[in-house]
Structure formats: C-alpha cells, structure tokens
Image: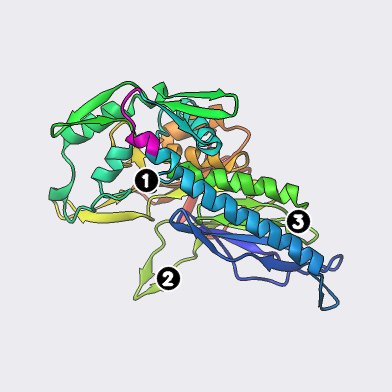
Amino acid sequence: MKRSAAIIAGLIMLAAPLCGCSPAREYSRMSGEYFYVMNTSAALTVYDYFEVNGVEDRLLTAKFSNMEDEVRLLLYGLDSSLSTSYEGSDISRFNAADAGARVEIGEDAYNVLSVAKSMYELTEGYYNPAVYYSLQAYGFNGGEEPKSIDDLPTEEEISIYVELSEHFGELALEKEGDKYYATKPDITVEWQGAPLALKVDLGGIGKGYAVDKVNDLFLKYGYEYGNFNFGASSIAFKKYPDAAGTFTLGLANPRRKTENGVYTEPGQYIETDVSDVCVSSSADNKNAYILTDESGAPVRYCHIFDPYTGKPIESGVMSATVIGGSAAENDALTTAIMAMGAEKAVEFINSALTGRQVVFTVDSGDGYKFYTNIPVGGYRIVSENFTRLEIN
C-alpha cells in the first residue's frame, strides 16, 4: 500500500504511518519530532534500514538524529531571521527602519527577499509581501479581528496602504563581501497623522524557503526516501520505498460540507502521484473569518490579499496548488494565482508556469470547478462535486 498525503483545505497533511514495506526492500520509517516554529508545525520523515531483523542500526539512527538536529537549528534560525514579531529579527529591524534606510540583514533574509522580488516581478505584482498594513487592518498578522462590517477599515485607509505597497519593487538588495543589505524605498504615506514607511511580511514564502533548504539536506545526508512537511502548506517529497516510488497526493475540497457534524462528501476532489518534487498550496478557508454584510449574507475574509485592492481576495478562486520547482516560489505563486482570478490565472499559467503542474479551484456560482494543466490520466477524480476545466 502506498503512503498518501492530502492537501486538506489548502493544508498538506500526511496520512497515518504505514509499514513502508515492499517485496524488494524492507525499509522502516523514522519520523522526527513535530517541530513547532513560525506559528505552525513541521515534520520530517525518512525511510532507511533503521532496523535489520528487528535490531536497530545505531549508526543509521544516529545519522537521522544529526539531520533532525540540523533541521531544528535551520527552522529556528529562519524564524529568528524572518519573523515580524521578534524585535531583533532581520525583517523586524528592516520594518522598523526609516524610509530610504539601508539595513544590514542575514543571508537567509536576503535570499527570501530576493525570491520575493523575483516573484513580484513575475506575477506583475499579484504576489506582494508589502501588504503588511492592509493585513493588520483586516485583523491578520497581529491585527485585531473585526467583529462586524462596521469594524472594517475604510476605503480611504486601505487606499493609502495600497499606495505604499506599490513601491515594493523599489526595494534594493546588495551583497558586499560576506555582508547583505536591503534598502527600503524612500517613500512614506500618512495615516491619522503618522508617517508610514514600507513594511513586509515574508511568512507567505518563508516556510517554502525552509522546505527548499530541508530538501537540500536530504541530498546532504544521502536520503532517497521520505518527505518534509512544513506548516501543512509546503512539502518536499522524495521517493516512497516501493516499486512505484511515488506518494499519493490528495487535493482537498476547500468547501467540504458537513451535516450534523458529519462530512457528507469526500475530503479530496482529485489525487495524483508525486515524487522528488516540492508542492505548495494556498486556500481561503484557513486563517479566515466570516462577517454578515448589509443584506444579511455571509462574506468570507481570508488572509490572502489582492495587492491592487488592499483587501482580502474576492476572485472566486478558493485554493491553488503548484507542483514542481522551488517551494518558496510556489508559495508566492499560489498566493498570486488566488489573487488573479480564474481568467488571468489561466493566462499566467500558460505563459509563465509551463514547467510546473498547477491546480486551482473556483466557486463559479454554478458549482465548483477545478482548472489544471495536469494531463488527463495524470490524476484521479475523487469527488463528483467538482468538474474539470482545461488550462489552455
């Protein structure tokens, strides 16, 4: 039986442990502890000959422990560099600096900002980590969650934040010897008498960057089989130790319904087989809240923002998944696809993402649909509640 993984409501969750046995090899599974970092959990799983005839191979288990320690140091080091809540982190110091300031940062913060800039340019601004103030105004990223629509920020306030975030592309990055620098755009806006300089939140791609780094550690330690799941939104798949060598990845319904507390439909709408790839997913049903509008209708406000409006997305896209390439890039790409909306997303995927597999779901008003460039036969439909539309 093949080990499976499921993207549940935009989250990547591994199934219960299986034996991992095959006729040709007898691998055993070794799972690292569930790290909790960057406000979420992470899990490392490796398959190797950790036991032979029921006897533990201490050298192999010690090697795994060394990798586990290195992963732990990596994750906590990235958190201390990229966090917006740690006062001394590279990103907190950057955010606190005045407009136009040149701030020395660490190599990881420099690398993540470099990815952010390249994805900002590739997506024509639909991925923009400078929506910092808008996020807070709507109750995310440490802001106070509105209790009713009367508590939502005004159009005037949001327009000011959008004006500032539009300057993200002017951020300058430099490397001088073994030192790294980020220079803030020399622009401020004013809200309620306070001048505001540009700030960023890299949480959207920081986890993917960590997945890319751990993916490199699999190679360093010589592990061919296993996976690393971070934050249930990004995962690095190696091979699974059976004849096929693949994991089954299930893509879940972000609008899965319940009746009397019981799910009335399958958790996934399609599944596909993967190995030796990084996968990232975003969805609008996690880290979200619902308010009632003037007509009494429920309105969803999620943590994924349209940088051009400065508001939570209203594109109709419910979730997006990108398979292949860098996990950090994929984190940014899934966010951008959700902000673009279906028509522009299809155009973007066809022009810029031909080397990756993409799936995104849409609430079209006449039922749920999914768009994908995975060829027919490359996936299996699990739920009849979704219909396929071609990306072409």
Check disc 3: other Cα within 10 Å, few if <14, some if 14-19, many if 20+: some
Camera-side mark, 2 or 1: 1
Q: Position of residue 228 (x, y in %)?
A: 62, 55
Q: Position of residue 151 (x, y in %)?
A: 15, 49
Which image quarter is the C terminus in? top right
Would you say the residues marked 2 and 1 are in contact, meaning their CB atoms lie under 8 Å apart? no
Q: Which residues are magenta?
A: 93-100
Identify the element where label 2 is drawn: strand
Indicate the amino acid at tag 1: Glu
Q: Which mark is residue 311?
A: none
Asked whether the viewer can see residue 200, the reply is: no
Which image quarter is the N terminus in? bottom right
- Measuring 29% from the left and 27% from the top, which residue is drawn there? 164
The residue at which mark 3 appears reads as 245
Relative to 22, 209 lies left or right: left
CA gap between label 3 and label 1 equals 44 Å
Name the image quarter holding residue 289. bottom left
The residue at which mark 1 appears reads as 87
Indicate the amino acid at tag 3: Gly
Verify whether residue 94 appears in magenta. yes
Camera-side mark, 3 or 1: 1
- Measuring 70% from the left and 64% from the top, which residue is drawn there? 2
Q: Earlier in the sequence, mark 3 or mark 2?
A: 3
Q: Nearer the viewer, residue 107 or 319?
A: 107
Q: Position of residue 100 (x, y in %)?
A: 35, 22
Relative to 298, 379 lies left or right: right
221 shown above or below 198: below
Q: Which mark is residue 263?
A: 2
